[in-house]
Amino acid sequence: MLDWSCLPPALSNGSETFAVDLAATRTSGIEYIAATERADGPGAPEWASRAVAELGATLRVVPHADILGHRLDNARELLRYAKWRVSLSQRITLLAALDHEGSLTLVECMSAVRNSTDPIGAVAALALRRFVEIDLDSGPLGPETRVIRFRG
């Protein structure tokens, strides 16, 4: 992903509107992403898909059930660090520790980058840039949350 924007303008068709939650700019183009309550169908009116196509983008609708649990709250916590910059030495230190141990807890990762002005910010930024993966599903982020090296 090259860039993203939360809450892009809603799509409208006369008196109808359809809210899009996120716009993601990828190398392949712009993708609008919407969470929907419906799990039994596409979840977006046909006119919304056409409107997005006219903008030269694509629309992906994610059933709300797919983002229930702790994942969404944890992702929101991490997103505040999207523009955070991590020094090369901090990145190498953390990645070397993960290579050596296989996985670390979040608090152990924070110790590895303790020279940072905000160690959690450094770990979160590395997760958002896909250097590391943080377990977003097992519960709220905490000291025991597992972190592994990203192997995309």
Image: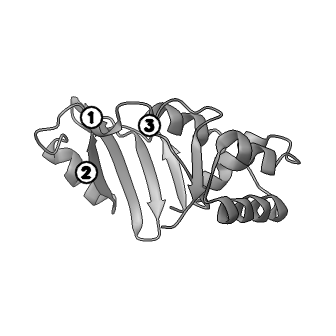
Q: Residue furthest bottom?
A: 28
In the picture, the disc for residue 118 is none
Between 90 and 78, the one nearer to me in the picture = 90
Q: Residue furthest left?
A: 40
Residue drawn at x 40%, y 70% as measured from the top left:
28
First in sequence, mark 3 or 1: give its number. Answer: 1
> Circle 2 is placed at which residue position?
51
Q: Amino acid at mark 3?
A: Arg
- Name the element at disc 1: helix
Between 152 and 37, the one nearer to me in the picture = 152
In the picture, the disc for residue 71 is 3
> Circle 1 is placed at which residue position?
65
- Name the element at disc 3: helix
Residue 128 location, x and y as percent? Answer: 59, 52
Residue 114 location, x and y as percent? Answer: 85, 45
- Of the residues tagged 2 and 3, which is closer to the observer? 3
What is the crowding at mark 3: few (fewer than 14 residues within 10 Å), some, or many (at least 20)? Answer: some
Q: Amino acid at mark 2?
A: Ala
**CA separation in Å, label 3 and label 1:** 11 Å
Between 86 and 10, the one nearer to me in the picture = 86
Vertical order, 38 against 28 (above or below) = above
Q: Is residue 127 left or right of residue 138?
A: right
Tell me whether circle 2 and circle 3 mark residues in contact (CB < 8 Å): no
**CA separation in Å, label 2 and label 3:** 30 Å
Residue drawn at x 34%, y 60% as measured from the top left:
57
First in sequence, mark 1 or 2: give its number. Answer: 2
Q: Is residue 101 left or right of residue 110?
A: left
